[in-house]
Structures are given as C-alpha cells and as structure tokens.
Image (tube, coloured by chain):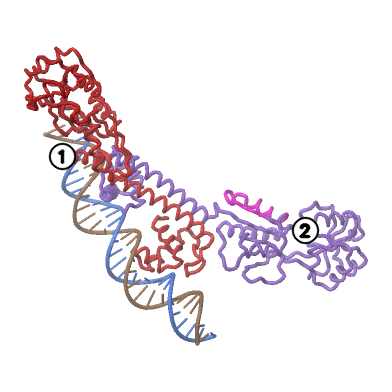
Chain colours: A red, B purple, C blue, D brown
Amino acid sequence: MLKIEMLRGFVAVARNGNLSDAAAELGRTPSAVSMMLKQMEEHLGEPLFETDRKNRLTPFGIFVLDQAERELQHFNTTVRAIEGYANAVFGSVRIATVPSVAGTIMPQVFSRYFNSFNQVDIELRDIDSQSIVHELSRNRIDLGIATLTKHISGLHSQVLMSDAFGVICAPDHRLARSADPIEWEALAEESIIANSLSEHIEAPASRQLHTAARLKAHNVVSILGMVRANIGVTLLPRMTLMAFRPGELAFRPLADESARRELHLLRKADATLSPAARLMEQQILETVASLQA
Amino acid sequence: MLKIEMLRGFVAVARNGNLSDAAAELGRTPSAVSMMLKQMEEHLGEPLFETDRKNRLTPFGIFVLDQAERELQHFNTTVRAIEGYANAVFGSVRIATVPSVAGTIMPQVFSRYFNSFNQVDIELRDIDSQSIVHELSRNRIDLGIATLTKHISGLHSQVLMSDAFGVICAPDHRLARSADPIEWEALAEESIIANSLSEHIEAPASRQLHTAARLKAHNVVSILGMVRANIGVTLLPRMTLMAFRPGELAFRPLADESARRELHLLRKADATLSPAARLMEQQILETVASLQA
DNA sequence: AACTCCATTTCAGAAAAATTGAAATATATT
DNA sequence: AATATATTTCAATTTTTCTGAAATGGAGTT
C-alpha cells in the first residue's frame, strides 16, 4: 500500500539528489531509506529514478514528486489545523454575557490574554440572562455569563462573582454626602427608579420600595441619565457602574448585604467545550480571581 | 505523530457511531481500533468523543472529522493519480512520425488500442525525419518514427519495418500493364518525378535517374497528383500509397530490393519513458507485427 | 582496462509498532 | 439492581521497520 511515509522519503531523496543526505534529513540510515524506496517502486511497478545514483528522476518520478509534494503540503496543513485547534491556537468561541459584564470583565479578559487568542475567532454578545440560557441550550453560544436564580438542568454553572447592590444617586444628592452603608429605611422617602436588576432583590423592604416606585427603566444608560438628572435614585450592583466615569455618580453600599447579584459562568453540562472555549473559560476565571485579589 | 491511519480509523468510528462496526470495516479487531484512537487522543491532548460509546463527537471531534475526511479524500486522489499514471491509465504521450506513418500505421494503432488510451492525452505530429530526431533530443516528444540512415548517439532506435520502393504511375500508363518487378533500365526513358524519399535511394542507377529528373516535389499529395495527370512516374515506398484509394494509381515493385526505406522507432537512449509512452511504444510494435503477419 | 572510491543495496538480526484474544470494565436497557 | 452490549486493558504475538556489516555496482582515475 502507498503510505505517506513513502512519499515523504521519496521527496527527501528526490530533493537531495542522493540517498545519504536524504537519510540524514529523515533521521534514518541510508539502508532504511533504500529499502523503503525499493518497496515503493515495487508497489508502483515503475522506477522512480533513472539510475542507482538518485540524482535523475524518470518522467514517472517527476510526476510522483509533484503529486507527493502537493500531498505532503496538504497533509501538513491538515495536521497543523488539527493540532492548532487542539491547542486553542485556532478555533472560535462564542460568548454571551449580561451587558455589565460585557463592558467590565470581558475587556479585562481580552487585554490580559490578548496573545493567546491570536488566531481564535471570538464573538461576544451582550444579552439578558434569560436569553443567555436559551442560546446556550440551543448551542448557539459556547459560554455565558448570567445571573442565575435557580439551577437549570442541562447547564453547568459555576459562581463567577457575587456583586452587592448599592444605591446610585447624583453627586449633589443628599444621600451622596456620606459613604456609609445605607439602611433600607433611609430610602423610604426617596423616589426610586426601578430596573430589571433591582426588581429581583428579595428583601421585603426592597419589594415594598419597588411597589411604590413610579418609574421603571431597563436600559442602564437611560437609568443613569435619569439619576444624574436627579429624577430619583436607583439600586444597582456595584459593577454596573464600573463602565462609567467615576465621580459622575455616587455609589453607596446597602447595609443589607444579602441584596446581591450572583454572576454565573455557564456552559452546557453534557457537552465538551472546544479547546479554545475551554481556554477562554479558564482565562475568565483567572481574570475574575485576579480582579478580586 | 499524527498518522494518516489514525485519521482513517477515527473517520470510520465517527461515521459508524461505534467501534465494532468501524473495526469490521477496517478489517481490525475493536481492540486495535480502540488503542489507536486512544493514542490519537493522547497525542492531541483532547477527547474526540463525548463518551466511551463512540456515538457523540466533541466539538473538537467534529472539527477533526471534517479535516480528516478532506485529508483522506485528497490522499485518495493523489494515490489514484500516481497509480493511474504508473499503470498508464493517465498521462500523456507525444509522438512524431513521418507523414506516411501518421496516415497509415498510427491510425491502426489507435483503432486497435482505443480502450487502453482512455484517459491518456496523445499528441501526434507528422514531420520529417530530421525534425523528429531534433525534437526527440530536445525532449519535446517521447517517441518518434522516422527513417534513419545512421545511428544517432543519445537515441535508442529499433527497426519498425522496412519498406521497399516501387514505381508509381497512372493506371493508364504503359508501366501499369504488368505487375512484375521493374528493372532500373525500364525507367530510363521515363520522366521521373523526384521526391525527398526517392532521393535517398543509394543505387547508382537511381542516382542517375535523379540527376536527369526535371521535376522534384516534396508533398506527397502533389506528387501523386502529378503522377495521376501522367506528368511522369515516381519512386516511393509502398506504404506511402496505403493512405490513398487503391486503383487510383498503379504500384510496381522494383526488381532491386535494396531500394528500401527503414522505418525506425526512436526514443531517447538514456531516459526512461513514461508508463503511457512505454505502453504506446509496445502497442506500436505489436500493431506493426500483426500487420506484417 | 583494471583500480579505487563512494554510494547504494542486500541481508539477517534487532527494535519498534501494531494487532490480537481474553479478561476486565464501563455503559445502556430491562 | 441485573443483564446485555460495548469498550478498554493487558500481555503475548505478529508484523513492520530499522540497523549495521558486508556485498554490489557505478563513475571517475590511473
């Protein structure tokens, strides 16, 4: 049978013009190369070289050399692609995160590991937590970072970080005068701007505030715009603010530390990640760990 | 090292969805295939299948399957090309012959061996003997059929056939009345149309006739046209006439049998022919042999 | 034409790699 | 949990490839 090792050996001999150099190049003895060539010619039923001195090819040899070089080239490319993919040098990763993460953690990950992702295609989307779960189970993304309230079957999740809620108000707001933790009671007289994150705070005091809230907004930029215009104050995890200029808005932690948002790193439970995605997963974890240190 | 046998094995398993069937397809025991797969995964450092039941690929496995199938396809194509060329199924042959052979022997060869040359490119040119030698030594043709007077170094030649000269005249010419061999003396009073072939007849009587000849032509069609118009008679090897309708012209052999043209089958002496050219050479010899039988 | 040098081939044994069959283990199905 | 089926492991065996030494074969030289 015609084997790729034969092609490799033949090409080496044809290019070197003699057995000994080719053998050295291949890391074999001339004897081994000679036998391999003999076997190849016997299989093909045609001489590849004009003489024993392997410096002149027959027309058949010329043809085979051309074919063999193409084949080896192609094989090399395939091997490099496979090994490159295995080592996460090539490949693609599709990630979806909640918007605040997309604007805070992910840029950190990319700047930290810029080099590792040289030739990896990365697709980052920011969507809401529910859509992330949906996209994951549909196999439309490889990794997700979302707020998870309950475990979802078919998904593997690990806590990435826990982000405490706080009160965000304009810098000239009366609440901005102190930096101490705020009790729920202190908010009773405030105009609260509800949002899709604060809605999920389970504390009864928070529920009450939200029932009373006259304004609810979803888009963070618009919420913060309203806060800055002193239309009211809002409750958001600290991280949400990180993407905006410091000083522009004031943040005061809540005294009730149970009001938090848990960010989970998600992937399908039953399926293996691609090497590049696995590397990305690891690097997200490392980045978050180093940010918390 | 990643070997093509690994790719073959992996593709078989991935396509069958289980080891046993793949092993049967490959003509190996499941054990052998299992070990090969293990070795492949160890080399790559990545699992190719999700579970031991080889029915679900990892993303990496999906990628490798695609790459491997392409590679095997390419390898097969290469092997087929090489083996096809070796067996003269593919390839090309460039032949040049003197015009009379191109119009007589070569059509016979092609009609006899039509099937063998299915996918072989054949290029047939008809040029004069000297050019054939020239083209051969320049490696512009693989085979030549020409009249050779002396041995030419660097060329291998073998006599293909020997063709006796005869007198060609119009059917109503007085020489056409008999079919017996003609003596040189019988031509003394004839108007001879000299031609590039008859010029080379070495017999002194022929030399004399040629010196006296008032007309010389090169193109066979025009020579025969003149003969038919009874402008004169000419001397040509019998074969030259074969391409024309019998009865249109009369042929009388020469009594002097030494007046002949030797047709040689030529090829380069030091170089091996391509398989297709060698097959063609053989088939030319066989055709001529059978024509003479 | 015989000789010399150098490369290649041949040969038998050695090493490496692949394969097997049987037993063990793992996975699905009932 | 039990059974049936599929895969893995292991050590032994077979096959393949490789090596080193000797033989052979050309090419160039005297």
Magenta includes B110? yes
Instruction: Identify residue type, mark 1.
Output: Ala
Of badges 1 and 2, the one in the foreground is 1
Residue underneath mark 2? B240
- For the residue pair A140 and B187, the one nearer the viewer reads as A140
Would residue B183 be visible to someone looking at this image? no
Q: CA distance from mark 1 to mark 2?
A: 95 Å
Residue at position x 75%, y 64% in the image: B163
Instruction: Identify residue type, mark 2.
Output: Thr
For the C terminus of chain B, the image quarter is: bottom right
Q: Position of residue B172 (x, y in %)?
A: 91, 55
Q: Position of residue A247 (x, y in %)?
A: 18, 29
Magenta includes B8? no
Query: Which region shows up in magenta?
Result: B103-124
Q: Secondary structure at mark 2?
A: helix
Residue underneath mark 1? A289
